[in-house]
Amino acid sequence: MKKILVTWWAWFIWSHLCKKLLDEWNEVICLDNLFTWNKKNIENLVSNPAFTFVLHDVTQPFWAQVDEIYNLACPASPIHYQKNPVETIKTSLLWAINMLELALKVKARILQSSTSEVYGDPTVHPQPETYRWNVNINWIRSCYDEWKRAAETLFMDYHRQYWVDIRIIRIFNTYWPNMHPADWRVVSNFIMQALQNKDITIYWDGSQTRSFQYVDDLIRGMTLMMNNDKWFIWPVNIWTEYEFTIKELAEKVIELIPWCTSKIIYEDLPSDDPKQRRANNKLAKEMLWWEPSIKLEDGIEKTIEYFRNQLLQQQLGFSVKRDIIKWVTLYNMMKIVNAERIVDI
Ligand code: UDP
């Protein structure tokens, strides 16, 4: 049994990681500053005595004797991280430094979840780890891209200078059940729109591409990287090679929801939106024997199921609330009517 620290944002993927670590009989401590928060995602974890949640201002140092640290913290949805770019870059970098200092002090292994965004708007396809980027340091996505790039440098330097036992993975467009319904990323947007028969909003003409990965494949790759003892520490793409256009994704979502009558509409492309993304995952296959196993259809179906239940619960909640309001109003009206009667008499 290991003691593992996970720094996270509660709505994010990490509830799936914590669940896996707890299922493997580890003790898990989670740190969060509640920047993007919903307590629902930890409700089923807190009952486990091996799970501890710590609310902590992550710009301040943190101490705990742990064996491993997964540093996963940072909102990853462009709309979320662009809402407060200064907070995004400042907090995330200070957080990374605090976690590296902790790893150094307690001799823990530390994994950094980096991102495809470090490649910018790539000019080489598929992108191997050795690709030297096509980035713009001044674009509106830079608050996210640049902290992730700086974090990779910091991790490598802590390793070269202090021998901190690091691991770095680069992750890409991942989707999962219990995503935030207002996450504003493409998978959750399309599913929410299609389930409610609203227009499906494709930005640009939908020919831009992404490779979508289901959360279970990512978590497997992440834990394989953490647990590899070969001193394989270099950044590795944990990513599926299957590339889809955004239009294909929209069509797939519509196809998987038989009652959907949504139509596709086209809107402007957000500034600096990368046109093509496809990973080269040869290194992960060779070094970790990792390969994605979940097909887009299967993952999307599970995610649709989750959002559908959420919507049903919401509607049920609304109709119960509506009924209560109706009855309270009726009761109050009856009181008024009765009062008038009494006066009449
Ligand atoms: N996108 C879209 N409609 C939406 C949301 C996103 O067409 O409702 C596009 C977006 O412009 C981008 C791609 O889908 O080209 C993936 O966007 P997302 O925000 O999910 O992730 P990114 O890879 O850009 O970080």
Image (spheres, grey):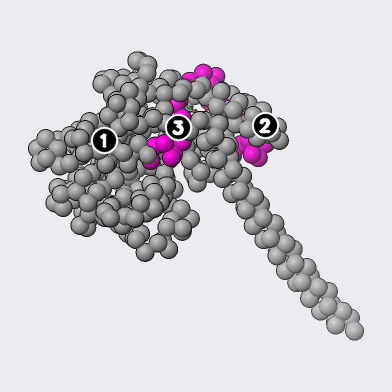
Q: Does the CB distance between marks 3 and 2 fall below 8 Å?
A: no
Residue 124 image position (x, y, % from top left): 34, 15
Quarter of the image holding residue 258? top right
Is residue 205 found inside the magenta-colored segment of the image? yes
- How many numbered marks, from 0 up? 3
Give the side of residue 247 with respect to residue 137, left or right: right
Label 1: which residue? 168
- Nearer the camera: disc 3 or disc 1: 3
Q: Which residues are magenta?
A: 192-219
**Quadrant location of the C terminus?**
bottom right
Q: Earlier in the sequence, mark 3 or mark 2?
A: 2
Amino acid found under the numbered disc labelled 1: Ile
Residue 148's place in the image compared with 130, above or below, is below
- Which label is found at residue 293? 3
Residue 43 image position (x, y, % from top left): 46, 59
Quarter of the image holding residue 62? bottom left
Q: Does the CB distance between marks 1 and 2 fall below 8 Å?
A: no
- Which label is found at residue 262? 2
Residue 150 visible somewhere in the drawing:
no
The alpha-carbon separation of the residues under discs 1 and 2 comes to: 40 Å
Residue drawn at x 29%, y 26% as measured from the top left = 286
Residue drawn at x 44%, y 26% as measured from the top left = 211
Residue 78's place in the image compared with 327, above or below, is above
Amino acid found under the numbered disc labelled 3: Ser
- Nearer the camera: disc 1 or disc 2: 1
SS class, disc 3: loop
